[in-house]
Image (tube, helix red, strand yellow):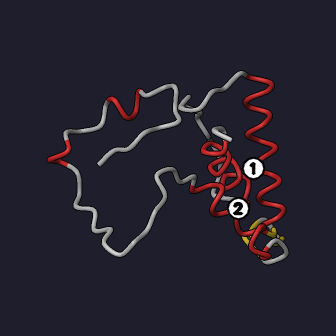
């Protein structure tokens, strides 16, 4: 079931429970590519499809567009890579309230593989 990974730190993958304890995944009828970056699909791809000016998040008294969210999460990912040497698969602790900043931080992690 597990395909290739872009992560260099495989701690999480190496410590998964045995496959007989996994839930059943019913993916019949879905066509997924071999590699899928969900953060890119939820932000950058929405901009590419022409939804950049549409509202992606509402919180802290304002609305943020897909373009804003994409730019925000990309800036966070680049800062972690360039300033702190984070590599794909490294674990990053996020401590935050339930707000748009938390969403941007959560979405930047998979973008580290860009």
What residue is rendered at 17% in x and 48% in y?
Answer: 21
Tell me where residue 47 appears, x and y as whole percent.
78, 67
Residue receiving disc 2: 43
x, y percent for residue 2: 33, 44
Residue depicted at 62% across the width and 42% down the height:
109
State which quarter of the image contains the C terminus: top right
Q: Residue at x 51, y 50 (%)?
A: 35
What's the mark number on residue 48?
none
Q: Is residue 58 above or below residue 8?
A: below
Report the number of discs: 2
Q: Secondary structure at mark 2?
A: loop
The one of 101 and 106 positioned closer to us in this rendering:
106
Q: Residue at x 63, y 58 (%)?
A: 98
Q: Residue furthest top?
A: 85
Q: Nearer the viewer, residue 20 or 50?
A: 50
Q: Residues within 10 Å of mark 2 (few under 14, many from 20)?
A: many
Q: Is residue 21 above or below residue 112?
A: below
Residue 104 place in picture, x, y as percent: 71, 53
**Real-space Cα distance between discs 2 and 1?**
9 Å
Query: Of the residues tagged 2 and 1, which is closer to the observer?
Result: 2
Residue 22 image point, x, y percent: 22, 51
SS for callout 1: helix
Q: Are marks 2 and 1 in contact (CB under 8 Å)?
A: yes
Quarter location, residue 90: top right
Mark 2 vs mark 1: which is more N-terminal?
Answer: 2
Of residue 90 and residue 57, the one placed in the foreground of this image is 90
Q: Is residue 91 shown above or below 19? A: above
Q: Kindly identify which residue carries mark 1.
A: 73
* Label 1, residues with CA under 10 Å away: few <14, some 14-19, many ≥20: many
């Amino acid at each position: 079931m597990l395909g290739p990974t872009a992560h260099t730190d495989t701690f999480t993958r190496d410590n998964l429970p045995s496959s007989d304890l996994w839930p059943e995944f019913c993916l019949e009828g879905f066509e997924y590519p071999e590699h899928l970056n969900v953060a890119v699909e939820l932000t950058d791809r929405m901009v590419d499809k022409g939804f950049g000016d549409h509202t992606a998040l509402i919180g802290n008294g304002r609305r943020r567009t897909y373009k804003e969210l994409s730019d925000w999460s990309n800036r966070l990912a680049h800062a972690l890579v360039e300033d702190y040497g984070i590599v794909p698969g490294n674990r990053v602790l996020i401590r935050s309230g339930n707000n748009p900043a938390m969403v941007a931080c959560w979405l930047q992690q998979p973008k580290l593989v860009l």
